[in-house]
Amino acid sequence: MVSISKIVFLLSLLLTTLFSLQLKGSEAEIVPFEVEKGLIPHKVSITITNLLISKNLTVHCKDKHNDLGYHTLNYAETYNFGFRPNFFWKVTLYFCHFTWEGASHYFDIYKQDRDECVQCVWNILEAGPCNVNPKHNQCYAWNQ
């Protein structure tokens, strides 16, 4: 007969393994921009467009495990990246530092508990970032 402590141990080992595999997948899985259907969360694509007239925009995005580096965009140029959000909890967060001549701002470009998009499109304006949506655009203030 199997004791309760062995069952608890095996269950905790299984949950720990599943959790660590999820974290490992979120660390290393910067993925191409394709959409999948099924139980695993969709791959999310982020597109950032510089709409600062006559100004170059430097974008530096990262999450807890991935630093995506610095990218400089001329007016109307875009920067794209993709990832797979957390399967178990809505905790995936990508934040970006935006700089241009005379300004420096931060914004959480993807918050899994806020954003429902699979293809998230952002226009960067001096007043703040705007999420472009077929139904309506949603503009935000910069993070403080």
Image: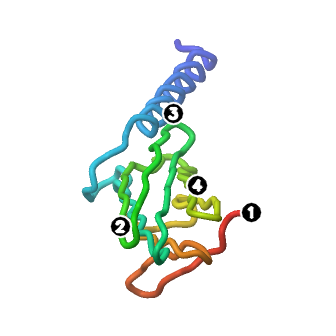
Closer to the N terminus: mark 3 or mark 2?
A: 3
- Of residue 131 and residue 125, the one placed in the foreground of this image is 125
The residue beneath circle 1 is 144
Give the amino acid at mark 4. His
Image position, residue 51 (x, y; %)? 45, 75
Quadrant of the rendering where the C terminus is positioned: bottom right
Which of labels 3 and 1 is toward the front?
Answer: 1
* Mark 3 → mark 1, Cα distance in angstroms: 32 Å
User: In terms of sequence position, does the residue under pointer 4 or pointer 1 come before the other?
Assistant: 4
Estimate how packed mark 4 is, as few (under 14), some (14 to 19) or many (20 or more) residues with alpha carbons within 10 Å. Answer: some
- What number is the disc on residue 19? 3
Separation (CA) of disc 2 from disc 1: 26 Å
In the current view of this chain or complex, which residue is farthest to the right?
144
Residue at 52% x, 59% y is 110
Residue plotted at (47% across, 64% down): 56
Depth-wise, is mark 2 or mark 1 nearer the camera? 2
* Residue 131 in view here: no
